[in-house]
Amino acid sequence: MRIRWKLFWLLAALSLVPLLALRVNNQRALSHLAERLSARVGAHLVAEAQSRLQRTVEDHARLLAARRQTLVLAVAMQADVVRQALAAAPNDTPPDLSEAVVMPPESPGMGMGRFQPPPAEAGFSETPDYFRILPDGQRLPLPIAAERLLLRLPQGTDAAKAPPQAVALAALAKPMRRIAALAGPLVHFQTTVLADGLTAVFPAIPGFPRRYDPTQAPWYRAALAATGPVWTPPQAEPGTGRIAVAVACAVPAPNGTMAGATAVFTPLDDLLASVSSPGHIAGDVETLLVLAEPGGSGPARLLVEAGEVARNPRHGGHGWQTFVTPSPLASPDAEVLSAMAADVAAGTPGVRRLTYNDRDCLAAYAQTGEGEALLQIAPVAELLAEATAVADDVKASIQQLYIFGTVIALAVMLALAFISLYASRAVTRPILALTDAARRLTAGDFSVRVPARGSDEIAALGRAFNTLAPTLDAHLRLCESLSLASEIQRSLLPAHPPAVPGLRLAAVCRYCDETGGDYFDFLPFDGPKAGLVGLTVGDVTGHGLEAALLMTTARALLRPRAAAAGTPADVLVDVNRELARDTLGTGRFMTLFYMEIDPAARTAAYARAGHDPALRHNPATGQTTELTCRGMILGATDDARYETGHVAGLAPGEILLIGSDGLWEARNAAGEMFGKARTREVLAAAAPHGPQAVCDALMAALDAFRGDIPLADDVTLLAATLAESGPTTPTGTA
């Protein structure tokens, strides 16, 4: 019997019984579908949101730390500028205060939400980022002079006979503006106060609170009591009433005493907004800074740093009369708050579910300082909105199916015999066409196509077949291109180490794909670095063609820069700056360890960009140490800074080993990692036999450890040792 008739009788026999059974159970199954789907989607969305919110708040906490560090550097620069200006203050020249808006001691200042209109020639204008907060929350524009600073003279000072310190501060508008431009938009006000009350504010504002004594301000006292830049708790910004944080630094006088202090004010809401991007998780995410307060005999409490703001309506709610105190995070879930406070006190990040503002929310937190954390709260209802919409759509579809189900079932039953007869023929015809086309494709005819009319599974199979032929053709071409790219990339790696007098070198690199992201190089120098040899190992994030391209770019940037004058840290700063032009915003980056060895002096200098530390092993003592220093990954930001580490007294036979994490993070069939401890053991055993033996022993140990498990990441090793005496030849590169 032909397959056409077999299909006919099979369809006729199997269609009626399943159709009747499905019709009976259809309504019951569909009635539970919406509930199960909504519950599963909701649970999945909440779990996914917890993971994403945790990663996001940790990223935001690191970004907040970077923002704070930028402001710390800004206030340190500011203090140095003020110190230099005071040291060079003229004593025998007429006072020139033309670059400042001078506020005499008897000036009425600001109060009750009003100020004296500034003269038109002073250059004041309204700017969106500068406004004052009244007790009722109303915002009033605050004119500023962006090119000048406000100089408030102390009591008993004649503006016509201003002291040299006033003249020195009056000339700081341009340096302050440059510092603000370098630090970015978070620099709101730059304030300098000397011990006699002389005050300079940049940019200039029309006046100052009349009863405000800046030498009693919390930030001023904290700066004088500290030995460097210090952060102060949230406080109201003088003159605007906005809740701000200040980083302050004492300014030494030429005679060794403290001349005063200087500070940078940043509105707290601007600081938090600069590290918050909640839209990709939920539209209503609240960002807070919280503190863990020890509870004594009871549980710890979680306090919002700027939780309670009390303004004095009698005086217009000015900043110096506004009181900011931490207040407990408002939630009825006391146990959850206590657990969160304990985590914050211990510096442990986490995500917890709690009730906040009468809504079920997810709260994620990550440490930003001792006993301090960044807290982001997202309502669960917004996260489940998609699940609710899915449930509603399913219920509507069920209702439509119930109405039309009976009619459709009867129509299908009446037409089933006719459809079975013709369906068998429709099935076999395209199958025969596909069989013939498959034979032609096997023979290498990639131009073969089959008719793919209709929307059933066989038509879809035909369209898939028509897509398969050009895809296979393109894949073969891609394989050839990848093979060529792999050959080119491997040609960029050193085939053999250079012959360097007094130095023995070896290296090995094994990629897990056709192309990889690991990189190593030997850089013998002449010119300003004659006698030095550069050694480097890099690891690009991921692997494959994109990683290979980024590795090639980094190699092209490193080689000419390393040959020029400069420390290893200087080299990485310049390479990172150029590499970041291509990688910013792409999510691609790489780690790098760069070392310069002086065989004659038996010393080495190195810098690392997020790479694992190198190992130094002395076979004579059996001691293995790590060579580490601070340094950010390459390509993440264009203004990263790096440190240079130094190694002195290298003895002949000591092994310096630089590797990529593909070695110690490799896993065997049991999921166990190769690990750094095993790396040290193999290094210690092979070190007496030289660098090539170290590389060979480590790769052999790795192969034995992982068995048949393929490599998940590229593995690169570079080993070096000082020779006993005389010029030597390289030991090898694999």
Image (cartoon, rainbow, N blue to C red):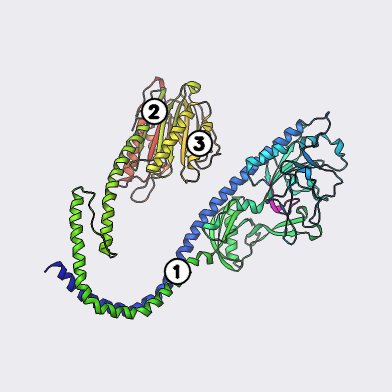
Secondary structure that dominates the magenta span: loop
Nearer to the camera, 416 or 384? 416
Q: Quadrant of residue 699?
A: top left
Mark 1 packing: few (<14 Cα in 10 Å), some, or many (20+)? Answer: some
Name the spot of residue 530 as percent of width and height, x first. Answer: 47, 21
Q: Amino acid at mark 1?
A: Val
Quadrant of the rendering where the C terminus is positioned: top left
Residue 371 magenta: no
Q: In this figure, which residue is indicated by the disc labeled 1?
A: 390
Is residue 511 shown left or right of residue 260?
left
Q: Amino acid at mark 2?
A: Leu
**Label 3 with label 1: CB-CB less than 8 Å:** no
Q: Which residues are magenta?
A: 231-244
Q: Residue at x 84, y 36 (%)?
A: 162
Q: In this figure, which residue is indicated by the disc labeled 2?
A: 505
Mark in the foreground, 1 or 2: 1
Q: CA distance from mark 1 to mark 2?
A: 63 Å
Name the spot of residue 509 as percent of width and height, x first. Answer: 36, 36
Q: Residue furthest top?
A: 726
